[in-house]
Amino acid sequence: MTLDDLIQRLRDFAAARDWEPYHTPKNLVMALSGEVGELTALFQWLTPDESVRALENPELKAEVLDELADVLLYLTRLADVLGADLLEAANAKIDRNEVRFPATE
Amino acid sequence: MTLDDLIQRLRDFAAARDWEPYHTPKNLVMALSGEVGELTALFQWLTPDESVRALENPELKAEVLDELADVLLYLTRLADVLGADLLEAANAKIDRNEVRFPATE
Amino acid sequence: MTLDDLIQRLRDFAAARDWEPYHTPKNLVMALSGEVGELTALFQWLTPDESVRALENPELKAEVLDELADVLLYLTRLADVLGADLLEAANAKIDRNEVRFPATE
Amino acid sequence: MTLDDLIQRLRDFAAARDWEPYHTPKNLVMALSGEVGELTALFQWLTPDESVRALENPELKAEVLDELADVLLYLTRLADVLGADLLEAANAKIDRNEVRFPATE
């Protein structure tokens, strides 16, 4: 299973439900933002140390995995409708960051 | 280039800069949220139709690709430090959505 | 009822529940962000025109008012624990914006 | 200076710049979300303890006040174009929270 498989699965999912008219980039950015808000809420009262062990709690683990999934789904779908290659963009950004933040010795 | 390659590249990047102590899930959720905020700002005054054509403007295209990249980088890094498998979680979520939202005929 | 009354009411509310240790600025920023995510989700599939009439639907109206309230509550509480004067900061910002964006004639 | 004064000042500001057509609730929710993202970014690498002392650093203080202001400005403007009374909604929400979360003795 790759990111390309996920892109295709989301295309089929939207087409089978006639959801394509709703999937404008503007709407999908908002959906992505809403899911990140839900993910944030799961961590808001945890200390940094507690956040490291978040997946040790089975109930919290299920919620975190569910929200991480939603964030990736909307991010992938957004990039697809825009015609952007997410992995290529991410690698190009790390290339730039390597120049911007030189490694310590 | 796959998502697994990206995970490894981000691990190496953080290790080479001694950034690992800052990369708690709590901090990374906030960083993810901040980048989604920057992405949202690029689309806030566009109509839905204008948002569809966002990548036709070279300057806006560069900004959108940069923010999409940042969102994927922090999402990937967050899942990695939590010990979560993003693609597996995303596929499991679509499985559940297929039951929750049956396709139209 | 003024914003100052609201600040005091939130102080009393947190003190009566021993919530003050959780109300660090870092945690409250995350809580604010989570509530804005919920507010965003209410508008994500609406067209701009539909969003103008959002309060005409009684069920949606109740949800929007609830989320607007949560956003103001966390914003007010955050400013209070930081020792910031929200209204003063907002007016100073409009002063700067009047210079930055001169009015059309 | 009250919240009502701020509402009026923002109405005049938008009218003088012909910005009213852009100020749909959908667009303003996105603008609010973008500003909360910028505020979040200021706190993302701080420990909870460091976040308590954020306003002791003059440079960070100026940035935090600027973002708090932007959040209040867009929240106020959003509520105004929707026809919602922010302070009334916030007080009604605390009333409900007092029932939902009884005070400890």
Image (spheres, coloured by chain):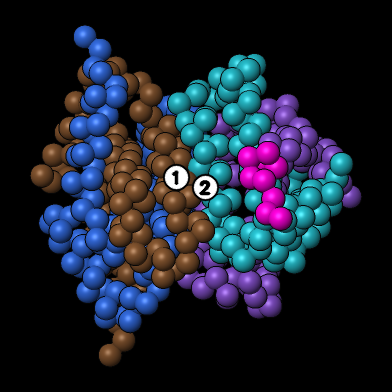
Chain colours: A blue, B brown, C purple, D cyan
Q: Which x, y percent locates residue A13?
A: 26, 73
Measuring 58% from the left and 23% from the top, which residue is drawn there? D60
Q: Quadrant of the C terminus of chain C?
A: bottom right
Q: Can you name the residue that lies furthest to the right here? A: C1
User: B44 or A23, which is in the foreground?
Assistant: B44
User: C62 or D59, which is in the foreground?
Assistant: D59
User: D26 or C80, which is in the foreground?
Assistant: D26
Would you say residue B95 sits in the magenta stretch? Answer: no
Badge 1, how many Cα within 10 Å: few under 14, some, many 20+?
A: many
- Amino acid at circle 2: Gly
Alpha-carbon span between mark 1 and mark 2: 6 Å
Q: Quadrant of residue A35?
A: bottom left
Q: Can you name the residue that lies furthest to the left here? A: B1
Measuring 33% from the left and 76% from the top, which residue is drawn there? A20
Q: Which x, y percent locates residue D104?
A: 74, 39
Q: Which mark is residue B1?
A: none
Q: Which x, y percent locates residue D20?
A: 66, 63
Q: Secondary structure at mark 2?
A: helix
Q: Are marks 1 and 2 in contact (CB under 8 Å)?
A: yes
Q: Quadrant of residue A69?
A: bottom left
Would you say residue C101 sits in the magenta stretch? Answer: yes
Q: Chain of mark 1?
A: B
Which residue, given by chain and number where applicable, does mark 2 sit on?
D34
User: B37 or A1, which is in the foreground?
Assistant: B37
Q: Which mark is residue B38?
A: 1
Magenta stretch in the rendered image:
C97-105
Q: Can you name the residue that lies furthest to the top here? A: A105
Q: Chain of mark 2?
A: D
